[in-house]
Image: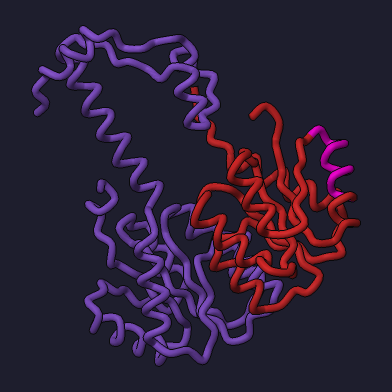
Amino acid sequence: MIADMVEKNKIVVFDEDTVILQLLKEYFRNYDYDIIAVSNTDHLLDEIHDPSICVTVIGIKEEGEYERALVEDIFRLNPDIKIIFISSYPTIEFVLEALRFNVFDIVIKPFRLESLEATVKRALSCPRQHTTIRLLQKRIAVLEEALKKHNIPVPDLSPEQAGELGIITDDPLVKSQTEAPPELVNSFRNVKLN
Amino acid sequence: MDKYRILVVDDELLIRDLLYDFFSSQGWEIVVAENGKKALDYLKNQEFSIVLTDLKMPEIDGMDLTGRIRDLYPNLPVVIMTGYPSLDSALEALRHKVDDYIIKPFNINQLFKIIKKVVESNVLTTDS
């Protein structure tokens, strides 16, 4: 699957408590994770830029506005990332805020390291939709280029096909009926792609 | 689907009637179910834009229903409502990827705003 081409085991751990940070770093290294440990939010956001980072584990000191802005920044920089909070005193309101902001999970202190690792593993196994979409878009661009080289027009989705996919669009090309004729499909089969 | 269609699941008749009247007045199609089992039957035969379910219900409760919906219809938005909020159920909702969690009693206009927002953000659009 295309998403499997993306490296999946890179995580960033953030905690202002450097003792916990060191502990988590050493623990995850034993499980072959590529782990980056940071103790301030600026460094966290610097690392999050990297699209190969799939998961971030964030130690929460106190719930509040600080977490909301941080989560927004993280998703803006890396829309596919899964965020896991570690928290001592979660309230219902805190959990519901996390839910509305698409935080993946909250691990409550005290916790077993194995249970945190299981949560990270679950996060890593989730599909990376934005990355997959980008890779598919690149693949489509390469195929379209190859078709153009051989003067083969690219067939578009019919309105019915777009409707089946739940796509709403004003694109006039999609709105027009364009089903590829059989001779076109056959000629496409003979195209050798680089 | 021309209109948005909502499936409301609640064992309380008053809540079902209230929500039926309100969503109908907003031009939505609405189907009500008094338990999780009926809800699953409706889901087999009809397409919905969203499911709004109570949490505490006999037989199949709202969380169990949500779990089954996630397995069978992973892209279907689910909003939970409950008069008995708890940290455990909030965490479970988070882990089930529930779209929102509403605490009763709620303001019906606020509820509608939330439901509409969830449905509209779930519709795929492409740029021309």
Q: Is residue B38 left or right of residue B18?
A: left
* Residue A97, horizontal then vertical, whole percent: 65, 66
Q: Is residue A113 left or right of residue B20?
A: left
Front position in the image: B39 or A61: B39
Q: Which chain is red?
A: B
Q: Where is residue A194, by image quadrant?
A: top left
In the displayed structure, A63 sits above or below B121; it is: below
In the displayed structure, B48 sits above or below A98; it is: above
At horizontal 74% and vertical 55% (from top left) the residue drawn is B9
* Residue B114, horizontal then vertical, whole percent: 74, 50
Q: Is residue A151 left or right of residue A37?
A: left
Q: Quadrant of the N terminus of chain B?
A: top right
Q: Main secondary structure of the magenta part?
A: helix
Front position in the image: B68 or A62: B68
Is residue B13 part of the magenta span, yes or no? no
Q: Is residue B98 visible?
A: yes
* Residue A159, horizontal then vertical, whole percent: 49, 18
Q: Is residue A47 visible?
A: no
Bounds of the magenta segment? B18-27
At horizontal 70% and vertical 62% (from top left) the residue drawn is B101
Chain A, which colour? purple
In the displayed structure, B100 sits above or below B127; it is: below
Front position in the image: A57 or B65: B65
At horizontal 50% and vertical 66% (from top left) the residue drawn is A104
